[in-house]
Amino acid sequence: MDTSSLQKSKFGFWSIVLLGINAIVGTGIFLLLNKAYALMGSASMGLWWLPCYLAVLCLVCLAA
C-alpha cells in the first residue's frame, strides 16, 4: 500500500466533528422517550420501537 492510498483513508477534522455531532443528535431520539414516559406512563414503553425501527432503517440504508 502506498502513502497516497493511506492518506485517503484517514478521517479529516470535519469528519470527526460531524461524527461527534451525529452521536449527540442520535442519542437525543432515545432520550426524548423519558419525556413521553412522564406524560403517558407505562403505555409509552411501546414508543421504544419507533426509534429502534428508524435506527434499523438507517443501518440498512448505509449497508446497501
Image: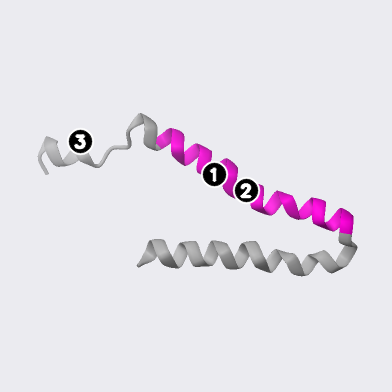
Q: Quadrant of residue 7?
A: top left
Looking at this view, name the residue that lies furthest to the left: 2
Instruction: Give the magenta-colored segment's residue range.
Output: 16-39
Q: Disc 3 on helix, strand or loop? A: helix
Question: Do labels 2 and 1 touch, CB within 8 Å?
Answer: yes
Q: Which residue is mark 2?
A: 27
Specify few, some or many for label 1: CA neighbours under 10 Å numbering under 14, 14-19, or 20 or more.
Answer: few
* Left or right: residue 3 compared with residue 61: left
- Please state which of residues 51 and 9 is positioned toward the viewer in this rendering: 51
Q: Disc 1 on helix, strand or loop? A: helix
- Please state which of residues 57 and 10 is positioned toward the viewer in this rendering: 57
Disc on the earlier residue, 3 or 2? 3
Name the residue: 57% across, 64% down.
54
Name the residue: 88% across, 62% down.
40
Specify few, some or many for label 3: CA neighbours under 10 Å numbering under 14, 14-19, or 20 or more.
Answer: few
Residue 8 x %, y %: 21, 39
- Please state which of residues 2 and 24 is positioned toward the viewer in this rendering: 24
Q: Which residue is mark 1?
A: 23
Q: Indicate whether residue 35 is drawn in magenta.
A: yes
Q: Which residue is mark 3?
A: 7
Residue flagged by tag 1: what amino acid is it? Ala
Front tag of 3 and 2: 2
Predominant SS along the magenta part: helix
Above or below 27: residue 39: below
Residue flagged by tag 3: what amino acid is it? Gln
Distance in Å between CA atoms under marks 3 and 2: 31 Å
Name the residue: 19% across, 39% down.
6
Q: Disc 2 on helix, strand or loop? A: helix
Distance in Å between CA atoms under marks 2 and 1: 6 Å
Distance in Å between CA atoms under marks 3 and 1: 25 Å
